[in-house]
Amino acid sequence: MQRLTPASSWSALVLASALVVMPAVAQQATVYKWTDEQGVPHYSDQPPVNAESEALPIRYRRTDKAAVQARIKTDETRQGAEDLREDQEDAEEETAATQREKDLAERAATCKQARERVTNYNQAQKLYKPGPNGDRIYLTDEELDAERADAQRVMEEWCSEE
C-alpha cells in the first residue's frame, strides 16, 4: 500500500473539497441585466463592458425525469377523467332534452284532447255514461255541470304553460 505524502494529502483534500462544492455551483448562476440607450432591456451571462448592469442570481435544479413523467401521467389521467365527465354530462343533457321534447309533445296531445272534451261537453245537450248492461244512463243537469267543470279544470291544467 502506498503512503500519502503531505503534498498528496493536500491535493486529495483540495480535490475532495472541489467535488463537494461543484454540485452547489452547478445549481446557481448569475444573469446580468442592463438597458441600452433606446431603453431595450438585455440579458446575458456576461456583464456588459460599456454599461452598468444588475446581477440577477438565478437558482435552478436538475429536472427529475421520473417526477416529470409521473406529473405528465397524472395530468393525462386527470384530463381523461375530465373528458369522460364532460361526455357523460353531454349525454345526460341530450337525454334530458329528448325527454323534455317527448314530455312537451305528450302534454300538447293531452291538451288537445282536453280542449276537444270541453268543446263536446259544452255543445252537448245531454251526456250519458254506459250502464252495466250496455244501456245509457243520462246525467242530470247537476252531474252535467260537474262534468263540464271537471273537463274545464283538466284542460286548464294540461294547457297552461309551466
Image: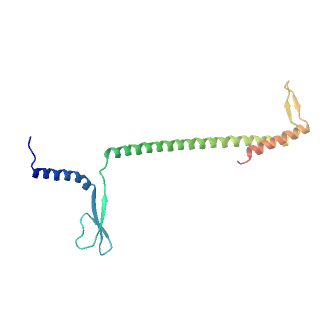
Image position, residue 120 (x, y; %): 82, 40
Answer with the quarter of the image where residue 128 lies.
top right
- Residue appearing at x 90%, y 39% in the figure: 142
- Residue appearing at x 31%, y 60% in the figure: 58
Outermost residue, bottom direction?
37
In the rendered image, the vertical position of residue 24 relative to residue 96, given as above or below: below
Image position, residue 4 (x, y; %): 10, 47
In the rendered image, the vertical position of residue 6 relative to residue 36, given as above or below: above
Nearest to the observer: residue 44 or residue 77: 44
Q: Report how many numbered discs are placed on residues in the image.
A: 0
Image position, residue 118 (x, y; %): 81, 42
In the rendered image, the vertical position of residue 135 relative to residue 8, given as above or below: above
Outermost residue, top direction?
133
In-image side of 30 versus 10 (left or right): right
In-image side of 87 versus 70 (left or right): right
In-image side of 62 versus 136 (left or right): left
- Residue appearing at x 23%, y 65% in the figure: 46
Image position, residue 101 (x, y; %): 63, 43
- The quarter of the picture where the N terminus appears is top left
- Residue appearing at x 47%, y 44% in the figure: 82
Outermost residue, right direction?
141
Q: How is the image coloured?
A: rainbow
Answer with the quarter of the image where residue 42 lies.
bottom left
